[in-house]
Image (spheres, grey):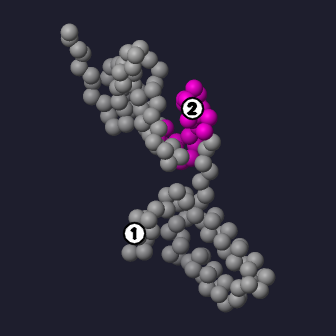
């Protein structure tokens, strides 16, 4: 029995053998979870593999900038029904912490001098490094790099 050689695929694109025949699957990360989705059945050739690779890159770009809508790309997927994790931006969290400290000063639970020190640290040049970072992006290795 002669088996056709499967074309080589770029990273994140695989060819899966299913009961109904071969299908292209793409992999990407969404909401800190590894996702794999089968594309609709099609003839597997260089053009369809290139399409899958371009689709994967488009999805990864939209995930990175926060505009990816799972339902739009894969309406029948169980992942489309999952709730989206809303990521908090570090500058927002730092500002909320500063507001909490201000309330503590107003309530007499914190010294104004301590508050000024905290405010100076939070609003300082070093903490601006974290502006634009999502909370999920602040990893132990990122903190170690920042400290060093």
Look at the image and tell me whether residue 110 can be seen.
Answer: yes
Q: CA distance from mark 1 to mark 2?
A: 37 Å
Give the labeled residue for mark 1.
Answer: 145
Q: Tell me what residue is drawn at x 49 percent, y 58 percent.
A: 137
Which sits in the foreground, 46 or 146?
Answer: 146
Locate residue 80, reporting x and y percent: 59, 34
Residue at position x 20%, y 11% in the image:
2
Q: Which residue corresponds to the image point at 59% horizontal and 28% vertical from the top-left? A: 75
Depicted 22 relative to depicted 99: above or below? above
Q: Is residue 42 above or below residue 34?
A: above
Position of 27 with respect to 70 (left or right) is left
Q: Position of residue 22 (x, y in %)?
A: 36, 19
In the visual, does 135 lie left or right of 56? Answer: right
- Residue drawn at 68 percent across, 68 percent down: 96
- Sequence-wise, which precedes: disc 1 or disc 2? 2
The local secondary structure at tag 2 comes to: helix
Judging by the rendered image, the residue that carries numbered circle 2 is: 78
Residue 9 is a magenta residue: no
The answer to which quarter of the image holds residue 26 is top left
Region of the chain picked out in magenta, as a range: 59-82
Tell me where residue 69 appears, x and y as whole percent.
59, 37
């Amino acid at each position: 029995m002669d088996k056709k050689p499967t074309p080589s695929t770029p990273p994140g694109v695989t060819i899966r053998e299913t009961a109904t025949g071969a299908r292209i699957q793409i992999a990407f990360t969404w909401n800190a979870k590894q996702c794999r989705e089968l594309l609709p059945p099609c003839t597997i050739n260089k053009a369809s593999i290139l399409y899958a690779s371009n689709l994967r890159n488009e999805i990864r770009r939209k995930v990175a900038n926060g505009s990816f809508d799972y339902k739009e790309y894969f309406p029948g997927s169980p992942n489309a029904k999952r709730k989206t994790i809303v990521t908090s931006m570090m500058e927002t969290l730092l500002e909320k912490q500063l507001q909490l400290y201000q309330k503590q000063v107003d309530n007499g639970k914190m010294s104004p001098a301590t508050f000024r020190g905290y405010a100076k640290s939070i609003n300082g040049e070093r903490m601006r490094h974290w502006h634009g970072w999502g909370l999920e992006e602040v990893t132990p290795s990122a903190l170690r790099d920042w400290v060093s």
